[in-house]
Amino acid sequence: MASGQGRVLELAVLGSLHETPLHGYELRKRLNALLGMFRAFSYGSLYPCLKSLLEQGLIAEEHPTAVTGRSKIVYKLTAEGKERLQELLTQAGPSAWEDESFGVHFAFFRHTEAEVRLRILEGRRSRLEERLDGVRTALARTRERLDSYTLELQRHGLESVEREVRWLNELIATERRASQEPAKDMSSDE
C-alpha cells in the first residue's frame, strides 16, 4: 500500500471498518458513497487492498453462519488496524490535501485531532489558492484567443475553486474558534 492512491483506499477501508464490521458488498457500497463523491473508485482495487490488509494483520475475517446457507465474509478492524488508522489520520502533509485524498481525510475528521484537521484544511486552501493564481494568470494571457465556450468553462472552473476556498475559510474559522473555546473556559474559572 505504498502508493498515494493505495494509502487513500487503505484509509477509506480502515476508516469504514472502524465504524462497524462489514462484508465485501457493504464495504463496496460504503466506499463508493465515500470515494465516489471525490474520485472514481475502481472495484478491482478493493479486493487486492483487503488481501493486503489481511496479510498485514490490520483487518481480520469473520465467517458467521448464515441462515440462508451461504455465509459472507465479514471484515473487521484489528488492534493493529486501529493503530494504523490513527497513524494515517495524523498525516497532515501535502498528500492529505491533494484532490485525490482530501475528501477521504475530511470524511474521517471526527476521528482526527483538531490540530491535524486545521493543518489539512489550511494546506488544502493554500493548494487551491495556488491553483487559482495559475488559472487567473493563464486566463488573462489567453482570454482573447479563446472561444466563448472555452472561456465559460474556465470561468466555471474558477468559480468552483473560489467557492471551495470560501468554504475552507469558513471551516478554518470554525476550527480556530473551537480550539480557543476550552482556553477561554479555563481562564474564566481562575
Image (tube, rainbow, N blue to C red):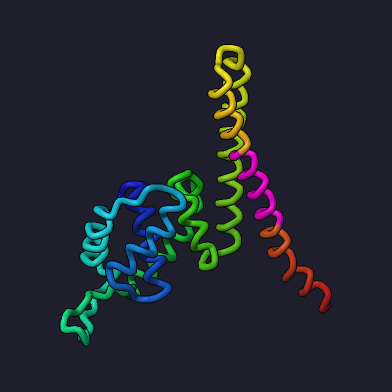
> Residue 168's x, y, as percent?
63, 49
Left or right of residue 71, residue 170 in this image: right
Residue 13 sits in which quadrant? bottom left
Magenta-colored segment: predominant secondary structure: helix
Residue 112 left/right relative to 118: left
Q: Residue at x 22, y 87 (%)?
A: 67
Look at the picture and state if 139 lies above or below 132.
above
**Residue drawn 60% across the image and 59% down it:** 115
Query: Which residue: 41% across, 66% down?
Result: 15
Front-lying residue, 61 or 180? 61
Q: Residue 9, image x and y in percent?
A: 35, 56
Q: Residue furthest left?
A: 69
72 with respect to 147 (left or right):
left
User: For residue 167: magenta?
Assistant: yes
Residue 11 shows up from this direction: no
| Magenta-drawn stretch contains 125 | no
Residue 137, can we see it? Answer: yes
Residue at x 26% of width, y 74% of height: 60
Q: Quadrant of residue 48?
A: bottom left
Return the x and y of residue 162 as percentages of the image width and height.
Answer: 64, 39
Q: How many marks?
A: 0
Farthest top residue in view: 145
| Residue 187 at x, y percent in the picture | 80, 72
- Quadrant where the C terminus is found in the figure: bottom right
Viewer-nearest residue: 154 or 61: 154
The magenta-colored residue range is 160-173
Q: Is 87 placed above or below 121 here?
A: below
Q: In the shown orientation, is residue 176 left or right of residue 157?
A: right
